[in-house]
Image: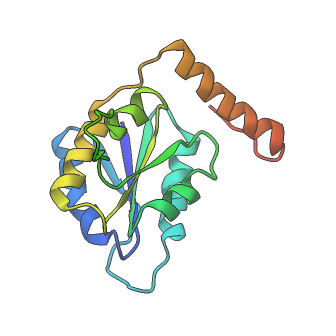
Amino acid sequence: MDIYFGADHAGYNLKNALIPVVKELGYHAIDIGAFSYDPLDDYPDFVASVAHAVSVDPKKAIGIVIGGSGQGEAIVANRFPNVRAVVFNGQYRPSDGREVPHEITLSREHNDANVLALGSRFLSEIEAKEALTLWLGTPFSGDERHARRIAKIEAVIKKFDPVCEPKG
């Protein structure tokens, strides 16, 4: 499995901290950039390259994109066919005592998310490493209802944007 990393200036340090984690887990890490800290760079420049790589080969590629919030990064990534990007900025903990499922786990089990967008302004390095490890270790459930919903996502793209033809 190839794991593509992309980050702007806000995610630069966290990206560099996460790449060794991925390698230790036995994955092939591919750094798309940024390769140096530049406070004037723009996240779409890096995220688009990661999303393109996942879009072209979604069975063999996963993406990790990191910015200040992860929100813009996910927006860019989700513009590409075959990409299902999710944002994770920390597990929600309700104040009323309810138990909620872990968002990272559900994003993989239910949605077969293949791009993880992290917000460096919300997560500590330890939290990001734990989230990444959990995300990579959680497989898609394969349940019929989840597969059906993912197929409907791709059908929406074909129906409403005929220029954009998903591959895979």
Say which of 119 and 95 sits in front.
95
Decide if residue 114 is on the left or right side of residue 166: left
Residue 128 in the image: x percent, y percent? Answer: 24, 54
Residue 143 in the image: x percent, y percent? Answer: 48, 14
Say which of 61 and 72 sits in front.
72
Q: Which corner quadrant of the image does residue 121 belong to? A: bottom left
Residue furthest to the top in view is 144
Say which of 127 and 9 sits in front.
127
Residue 124 in the image: x percent, y percent? Answer: 20, 62
Image vertical order of residue 17 relative to residue 161, above or below: below
| Residue drawn where x is 32% and y is 47% of the image | 92
Q: Which corner quadrant of the image does residue 60 belong to? A: top left
Q: Quadrant of the N terminus?
A: top left
| Residue drawn where x is 34% and y is 73% of the image | 35
Q: Quadrant of the C terminus?
A: top right
Q: Which corner quadrant of the image does residue 37 belong to? A: bottom left
Image vertical order of residue 33 relative to residue 133, above or below: below
In this picture the colour scheme is rainbow
Say which of 110 and 94 sits in front.
94
Please state the total of marks drawn on the protein image.
0
Residue 81 in the image: x percent, y percent? Answer: 64, 43
| Residue drawn where x is 57% and y is 44% of the image | 55
| Residue drawn where x is 61% and y is 25% of the image | 149
